[in-house]
Image: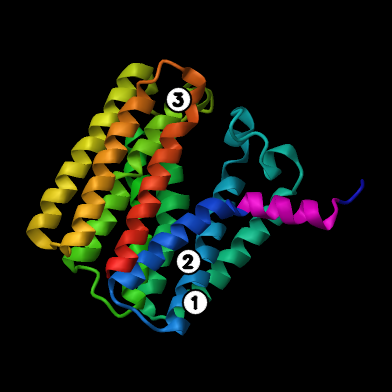
Amino acid sequence: MKRPGNRKVIKHVAELMKWKLSAAVTFSSVTGYFLCHGSSPGELSTVVAGVFLLASGAAAMNQYTEIKSDALMERTMGRPLPTGKMEPRKGLMIASILILTGSIVLSLNGVLPLLLGLLNVVLYNVIYTGLKKKTTLAIIPGALVGAIPPLIGYASAGGIITDPGILLFALFMFLWQLPHFWLLLIRYGKEYEKAGIKTIYNSLNGKQISRLVFFWIAGSSLLLWILNGILLPFKLPATLTMMGLNIAFIVLFFRVIYSPVKEKWSNNPFILINTFSLLIMIILIFAS
């Protein structure tokens, strides 16, 4: 059997790590770090490296444990493990090394960042993955996975993770994870059903899920602005910028999600949500 070239090996490992998603998770932890006014290059580099390695390891471990389910869905059947491009034992070895290395790196910032990082690995690979085929409520621990990285960054800078500012940002990350799950159902609901994953697809049709996503995002935005005004008012320029961006996003999201052109519809909501989240994080970093 011909061995894959170096480029293909790197490509397969990158796919196993879900490097783009892992990078996004890492950026949210960096935002948490700066919200605590962290300024140590050493601490920051440790946050970046530790969170990226842990997130990559968790993603790789998830693909190892879900080889059979991934093979049943068009969206995931092209991944390295279901296709046989990478042997399962190699996938497990890579995942274990990434998690171990990430844990060691993150521990340099203290016990709390390490515990939060390991908690996220357990939430994703044990609780969320374990519940996916049992209950539709599995998306709750799944969404919590997106809320913890900012806490890791905040704790790494010496902050107390019960501070209102970081809790609000973590709440934002949690609330905005849920629409990602629901949007996937509109396009891949039947595949999830085939793989035995419990979702709301059996209870709601595509239009109803679209409506749920829009009103969830609009309602979440309103809730977050109310809480922010009460607990943590930002300086006026940052507040006006984020409010204007939020209003523009909701208007654009409404137009895209109710677009009659199905092909255009399928990807743009994800692009809008991810772009908006990224811009919010950039504003928070510069405003902190």
Q: Is residue 72 left or right of residue 103?
A: right
The answer to which quarter of the image holds residue 216 is: top left
Q: Which residue matches tag 1?
A: 45
Disc 3 or 2, which lies upstream in sequence? 2
> Quadrant location of the C terminus?
bottom left
Q: Amino acid at mark 1?
A: Ser
State the separation of the CA atoms marked 3 and 2. 32 Å
Q: Dot 2: few (<14), some (14–19), or many (≥20) neighbours within 10 Å?
A: many
- 258 part of magenta stretch: no
Q: Nearer the viewer, residue 131 or 192?
A: 192
For residue 5: magenta?
yes
Badge 2 is on which residue? 51
- What residue is shown at x 32% (from left), y 60% (from top)? 283
Task: State the image coordinates of residue 83 (x, y, percent, origin top left).
Answer: 73, 38
The magenta stretch is 4-16
Disc 3 vs disc 1: which is toward the camera? 3
Q: Which label sits on residue 150? A: none
Amino acid type of the residue that numbered disc 3 sits on in the rendered structure: Trp
Q: Is residue 101 above or below residue 8?
A: below
Residue 100 position in % (x across, y down):
56, 70
Seen in the picture, residue 86 relative to 219 is either above or below; the reply is: below
Label 1 and label 2: CA atoms lie apart by 10 Å
Q: Residues within 10 Å of mark 1 (few under 14, many from 20)?
A: some
The disc labelled 2 sits on which kind of residue? Val
The image's mark for residue 265 is 3
Residue 133 visible in the current orientation: no
Q: Secondary structure at mark 3?
A: helix
Q: Quadrant of residue 135?
A: top left
Nearest the eye: 213 or 131: 213
